[in-house]
Each structure stands twice: as C-alpha cells, then as structure tokens.
Amino acid sequence: QVQLVESGGGLVQAGGSLRLSCIASEDISSIAMIYWYRRPPGKLRESVAYIKDGGDTDFVESVKGRFSISRDNAKNAVYLQMNNLKPEDTAIYYCTTPWHLGFNTWGQGTQVTVTS
C-alpha cells in the first residue's frame, strides 16, 4: 500500500506560517480523499482538513480561513499551508488516506510547535 511521508514542521512564533508536505510512494491520482490529521500534546488525534480527487476541500472549524490544502498528483504530493498559526495549533501533523485510517496505520508525522 502507498507509503506517506510528512515533512515541513518546525518551531514558529504565533502569527507565523508553515507549509507541510506529504509525499506518497506512488501515484495518488486514484486516491479519492487525502486527509491531514493532528495530535496535540495530551489530546486525541483530530482531523484538520481533507482534499478530494476533484479538488473539493474541507477544514475543521478552528483552522478555517487560516489553513489551505492542495494536492499535486504529478508530484504525488499533498500540502497543508498554515498561516496565522496559534499556540493551539501545536501538534504532530499526519497525512493519511481512507485505507490507512481503516487499518489505523500512521506515519511518523511532522512536529509543529507554535510559541506565543
């Protein structure tokens, strides 16, 4: 099954921006939905955003207007652009697919830390 590798996290001050990348090991054009999830420290993992193969997107309410998601099938990549970051966005961020969700399979993720 396709392997996903997240990158792009880091330490940023509140109000800053980061762009996360999710690179797949194979063609993603047939994957109907790709998600970004996050797990804040001490909390459960939550869905942040998804993008469908047709380009439709949706976001959790807390990031609407600040985050955007895009996919580049030619590069087997999905991106999460995060602007106006807040301390509560601090988390490990993961990309995933319905298949991976069904098997509760997660990659390493990428750490995002936002300082106030």
Image: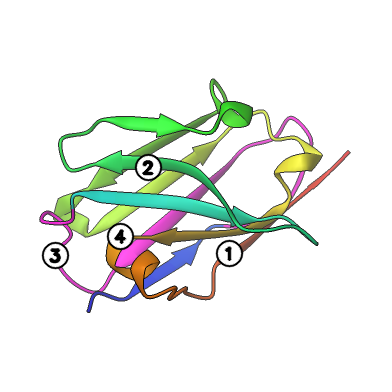
Tell whether label 2 touches label 4 (CB within 8 Å).
Answer: no
Mark 4–mark 2 Cα distance, whole angstroms, equals 11 Å
Mark 3–mark 2 Cα distance, whole angstroms, equals 18 Å
Left or right, residue 34 beside residue 64: left
Tell whether label 2 touches label 1 (CB within 8 Å).
Answer: no
Q: Residues within 10 Å of mark 1 (few under 14, many from 20)?
A: many
Residue type at tag 1: Thr
Q: Residue shown at 45%/40% (left/top)? A: 49
Q: Which mark is residue 27?
A: 3
Q: Residue furthest front?
A: 102
Q: Considering only order in the chain, which callout, 2 or 1, is on the residue closer to the N terminus?
A: 2
Rendering coords of residue 32 (x, y %): 18, 49
Label 3: state its secondary structure: loop
Q: Which mark is residue 110?
A: 1
Label 1: state its secondary structure: strand
Residue type at tag 2: Tyr
Rendering coords of residue 76 (x, y %): 22, 59
Mark 4–mark 3 Cα distance, whole angstroms, equals 15 Å
Query: Split into 4 quadrants, where in the image is the C terminus?
Result: top right
Q: Considering only order in the chain, which callout, 2 or 3, is on the residue closer to the N terminus?
A: 3
Discs 1/2, front: 2
Q: Residue furthest right?
A: 116
Q: Which residues, given as a range, are shown in magenta?
A: 9-31
* Residue that mark 4 sits on: 98
* Residue that mark 2 sits on: 50
Label 4: state its secondary structure: helix
